[in-house]
Image (cartoon, grey):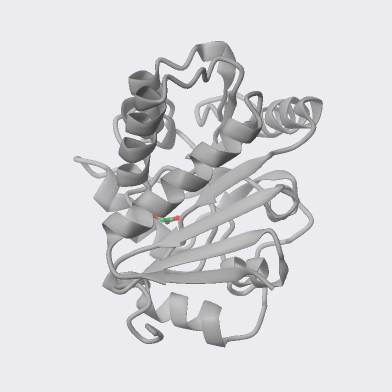
Amino acid sequence: MAKTRFVETHEELSVLAAEKIFSCIQQKPDAVVCLAGGDTPLRTFDIFIEKTKHHSVDLSKITFVGLDEWIGLDGFDKGSCRNTLDEYLFSPLNVKENQIIFFDGKAESTEGECNRIRNAINRLGGLDFILLGIGENGHLGFNEPDVPVDELVHIVTLDNITRESARKYFSSPVNVSKGITLGMKLILSTKEIVTIASGESKAPIVDQIINGPVTHKVPASLLNNLEIAEFIFDKTAASKNFV
Ligand code: PGA
C-alpha cells in the first residue's frame, strides 16, 4: 500500500517533497532522479535548491532524467518541459548537460528518441527517485487514462483535458497533440516514488485515487499498490478527503 500524507498548504507539501529529494541524493550521491515539470513542483525546486546550497551538496554525480515532453517542442521553446526544468532547476543548480537525459520533442524520429532514452536509463540501471505531479485526468507524465502499463518509454496521443491544460504553460497558443513520456512500467519500477497534488482542480481526481479502484483508467491510482510510493496532497487537492 502506498503511503498518503495530507498537509495544510502547498508550502508544506513543497517542503516535504524537497526533503524527500534531498534525502535521496544524500543517501546516494550518484542517484538517477526524475523530477516532473508542471506548476506543482516549482516551489519544491526552490526549496530543494536552497537546501543544496545551504549544505554545499555536491550534485555533480547525479543524473537528471526528464519525465516527458510535448512532441514538436524542445528546450528552446518557452513553456516546454525541458525549458521549465532548465529555468527552475538545472540552471540554478548549475547542472551540466552531460548529467541530463531529456527528450527532444523535435527529434526527427520519435521512435528513435524513445529508444535513445530507454537505452540511456537502462544503462544507468533504472531510476532511483521520481517526483510526479497528477493531471486532472489522473495522468502521470503523459500516461493518459487507459494507457498500456507495459511501456518503458512511449509516444502518447494526448487527451482533451491535457491539451486544454497545456494552455497554462504557454504565453501564446500551441498546437500539441502528442507527448513523449516515460511509461508506466518504468515509472512503477522506480525505487522511490513521490507524487504531489495541489489545487481545487485536482480534488475530483484525488478523490478517485483515494477512494476508487486501482485502474489504468486513472494511471495515478496504480501507485496505490506500491509500498515505495507516497502521495502528498494539500488541503485544496484533498478537499473531499481532508482528515
Ligand atoms: P501541474 O501539472 O503540476 O501543472 O498541475 C501536473 C500534470 O499535469 O502532471
Residue at the extreme left: 171
Looking at the image, which is closer to me, 193 or 113? 193
Q: Is residue 19 left or right of residue 194?
A: left
Up-down relation of residue 185 to residue 94 (above or below): below
Up-down relation of residue 168 to residue 70 (above or below): below
Tell me where residue 173 appears, x and y as whole percent: 24, 44
Tell me where residue 123 appears, x and y as whole percent: 80, 25
Residue drawn at 51 percent across, 17 percent down:
58
Looking at the image, which is closer to me, 20 or 157? 20
Tell me where residue 79 appears, x and y as whole percent: 31, 36
Quadrant, the N terminus: bottom right
Residue 46 appears in which quarter of the rendering?
top left
Q: Does any portion of residue 67 appear in the rendered image?
A: no
Q: Is residue 15 left or right of residue 11?
A: right
Residue at the extreme front: 55
Looking at the image, which is closer to me, 232 or 29? 29
Residue drawn at 66 percent across, 69 percent down:
222
Q: Is residue 188 left or right of residue 145?
A: right
Residue drawn at 28 percent across, 55 percent down:
11
Residue drawn at 41 percent across, 25 percent down:
55
Residue 44 appears in which quarter of the rendering?
top left
Looking at the image, which is closer to me, 220 or 49? 49
Up-down relation of residue 164 to residue 6 (above or below): above
